[in-house]
Amino acid sequence: MRVLLLSPFAPHLDHDHAAADTVVKLVPRLAAKTELFVYSPQVRAFTERDGYTLLPGAAPAGRFTDRLGVRPGWLRQAWPRQATVDVAELVDRIRPDVVHAEYLQTAEIVGRLPRTVLGLHDITAAVMAESVRAATGPARAYRLAELVRTRRFERDAIRRADAVVTLSPADRDVVAAENPRVVLAPPGIDLPAEPWRPPAPRTPPRLVFCGALWRRANALVAQHLVTKVMPLVWRTHPAAELRIVGARPGPEVTSLAGSRVVVAGTVPDLAAELRTAHAALLPSILGGGVLLKVLHAMALGMPVVTSPGPAAAVGGPLEVGATPEELAAAVARVLTDPAGAAARGAAGREHVAARFRWEDTVAGYLDAYATAAAR
């Protein structure tokens, strides 16, 4: 089968957030099963590599006027108008059996071309609705307008797609209400060869939160942890340290640093950073279908503290808390029962190995391709 895959993120580059890095590992695996062409605005030259063909794309211009149209303002930051024109021309030239639009940013072509598959990493409108609730002042009015535009854009793309792929059961159920041709493809996760091991006894407690810190969702979590959760943890574990790790932290994150809070920013090896911790502290405020950061921490075999949404999406033995009090209590359980926490972490690694396999991910996408090609 010949497939034209569209992605805002080039599969041959390194990225600073897990959602973009997913396509880096997905594309070579799809290429092993299909004749694959990949178009991305981040690709600058025609290139043959790893069994697939990279096609150069138009770079986003990022004009202020893009915020004023009927499309969401974020769309043109990743997918310029010229990209949609380019794709239509490529379809005439390549004659693919299926056009695969991965990530909502590429969904402008869905419905304009035949046999399209839409890959969604979360329900963006749901995440944005939480963002509106967390906003204040003039920013709230703009975020509300973006929510209206995003909800319409996402709903229309879901309805028009010949097949939709989601990463979590919750997102699948949302999509199924608009389009019955939906396939669940849980993300594949690589198990690190070196698992997490419990820190030495009497080592000061260390917790790690990680995420792309330039993203508002992650910045809000960092603020929530420092201002709401950690003060409760410090009542019983005053020596506990929180390390905030991730790319491009803004001033709202760097200002959180203190004697017991380290804003590490970008680190050379995230897995190595996590291996120094007693637990990964990874709750969600704005939601999302599957928090890949939770899965990657579980794959190490370490204790993970998260919130109900990610826990329901991922499953497995997690410490769960919805409120600051519940999250602090979950942290306390890990720190006061390190042997039990380590056992649950090891079971979490086994859960990821069994439930989040790349072969199942690829099979889900291939099922969606077959559904779209038959339309």
Image: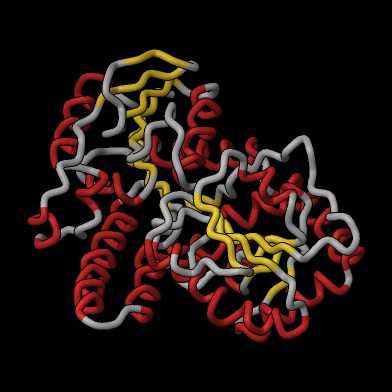
Q: Is residue 145 at all visible to an observer of this figure?
A: yes
Residue 75 percent coordinates (x, y): 23, 52
Q: Is residue 150 left or right of residue 129?
A: left
Quadrant occupied by the C terminus: top left
- Residue farthest front in this picture: 259
Q: Quadrant of residue 255?
A: bottom left
Protein image colouring = secondary structure
Q: Which quadrant of the rendered structure holds the N terminus?
A: top left
Q: Quadrant of residue 134?
A: bottom left
The residue shown at (39%, 35%) is: 373
Q: Position of residue 252 (x, y in %)?
A: 39, 68
Task: Tell which of 260 and 326 is nearer to you.
Answer: 260
Q: Nearer the viewer, residue 289 or 136?
A: 136
Query: How many labels, in total?
Result: 0
The answer to which quarter of the image holds residue 180 is bottom left
Horizontal side of 97 relative to 327 (left or right) equals: left
Q: Is residue 248 above or below residue 147?
A: above
**Image position of 106 (left or right of 192):** left
In the image, farthest residue toward the top: 48
Name the residue at 79% across, 38% down.
194
For the point 32% across and 78% down, which residue is it?
135
Q: Residue at x 9, y 62 (%)?
A: 68
Q: Nearer the viewer, residue 125 or 228?
A: 228
Q: Measured along the vertical axis of the image, is residue 245 above or below residue 189? A: below
